Image: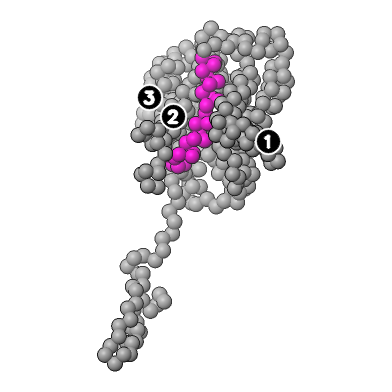
Amino acid sequence: MPEQDVPKLGSIPLKWISLVTLTFQNSALILIMHYSRVMPGYDSNSRYFASTAVLMNEVIKLAVCSVVAAYSRGLTGSFTEVFSRDCWKLAIPACLYTIQNSLQYVAVSNLDAATFQVTYQLKIITTAIFSVTMLHRNLSVMKWFSLLLLTMGIALVQLPQNILSVVASTFNVSLRLDEEEEVESKQSALEGEREMNRTLGLVAVIIACVLSGLAGVYFEKVLKGSQASLWVRNVQLSFFSLFPAFFFGVLWKDGIAIADKGFFFGYNAVVWTAIGFQACGGIVVALCVNFADNIAKNFATSISILLSFIASVYFFDFVVTANFIFGAAMVLVATYLYSKPDRRPSSIPDDFRPAPLQSTVVDDGKRPPLSSGGVNEKLQ
């Protein structure tokens, strides 16, 4: 793409703006969501209802995308596109994304932010599996290897914290990053602040990743070749997400408690910030895909994992273990390898490509015969 054709905001390419925004949004969202579920002074009886947060997330996203769609396409034109004959097809991914968002709240309530960020990369595996089964795509050996490496890294992060130290001790090697007494004291301090069910959090992440992969691939399959704009598609997704978020989340799951305590019970500035970041998340990812390639998007995701890890250590007393360090490193390497373009088989090397044949006319007007040997004849 010529330099003058690159979309810019002022003098800064939108590619870099979208990547920096995506990196910040990925890191801040998980940290704020986690803090909103475990912050001091709130317990299970005084904490806000996650179902109301999911619904408000879709309401805000619907309002923002509707305004932009109406501004770019006109009110009548955008309304016609949103409620086109095939708009119902987005009801399925909208429902899946709504359940996924609800499970994210369950996961961040029971896992620390750094572990959640690493484990959530399982969505790469689920997306790849659904791409092979539903879109009949072929994955290279390198991609399958990266998926295996990703699985091993995530499994290593989820193993008991001292497993590597126990294995290494059999070879007289020390891998502990903290003294055992210090780790136990930090763990007991964290348990005093909140009780997290690690198993429940892991199950929630796995189901959320399966739904994310299925929804993404279904979305791609159904809408392949569609001419609708980014904003129209986001309006459709948000509109259809309102129904499962309200009927299954607000009414069915928390209806009695909400009727007793109120819709906005437990809300504060942190909760509203988490909702705002989650509402902007889908829009930021879509913009990043528009203005940057998939490699850059995965690079931003990797940076956000590192930032979440550092912030978890500083703000939440996250215990650094050898398991997490090695597992997270494997996940980052696997993410890079999977996003790396496959090496296409090159054509005939330059040294063996046929040279252009020159017709030389001799004095008698006859063309000399072509050489009867050599590489050029074999390649004709």
Tell me the amino acid under the disc marked 2. Thr
Q: Are marks 2 and 1 in contact (CB under 8 Å)?
A: no
Q: In this rendering, does residue 242 appear at all?
A: yes
Q: CA distance from mark 3 to mark 2?
A: 33 Å
Q: Magenta stretch mostly in which secondary structure?
A: helix
Q: Nearer the viewer, mark 3 or mark 2?
A: 2
For mark 1, give the secondary structure.
loop
User: Going from the N terminus, do you reach mark 1 or mark 3 first?
Assistant: 1
Q: In this rendering, does residue 200 appear at all?
A: no
Q: Which mark is residue 21?
A: 2
Crowd around label 3: few <14 · some 14–19 · many ≥20 (10 Å): some
Crowd around label 1: few <14 · some 14–19 · many ≥20 (10 Å): few
Tell me the amino acid under the disc marked 3. Leu
Q: Identify the residue shown where x is 70% and y is 27%.
A: 243
Along the horizontal axis of the image, is 365 left or right of 106?
left
Q: Is residue 92 above or below residue 357?
A: above
Q: CA distance from mark 2 to mark 1?
A: 31 Å
Q: Identify the residue shown where x is 52% and y is 12%.
A: 269
- Start-end of magenta stretch: 270-296
Would you name the residue on which mark 1 appears? 83
Which scheme is used to colour this image of the protein? one colour
Crowd around label 2: few <14 · some 14–19 · many ≥20 (10 Å): some
- Residue found at the far top of this picture: 41
Q: Nearer the viewer, mark 1 or mark 3?
A: 1
Residue 344 coordinates in the image, percent (x, y): 44, 56
Residue 97 coordinates in the image, percent (x, y): 62, 31
For mark 3, give the secondary structure.
loop
User: Going from the N terminus, do you reach mark 2 or mark 1 first?
Assistant: 2
Q: Which mark is residue 177?
A: 3
Q: Is residue 335 above or below residue 102?
A: below
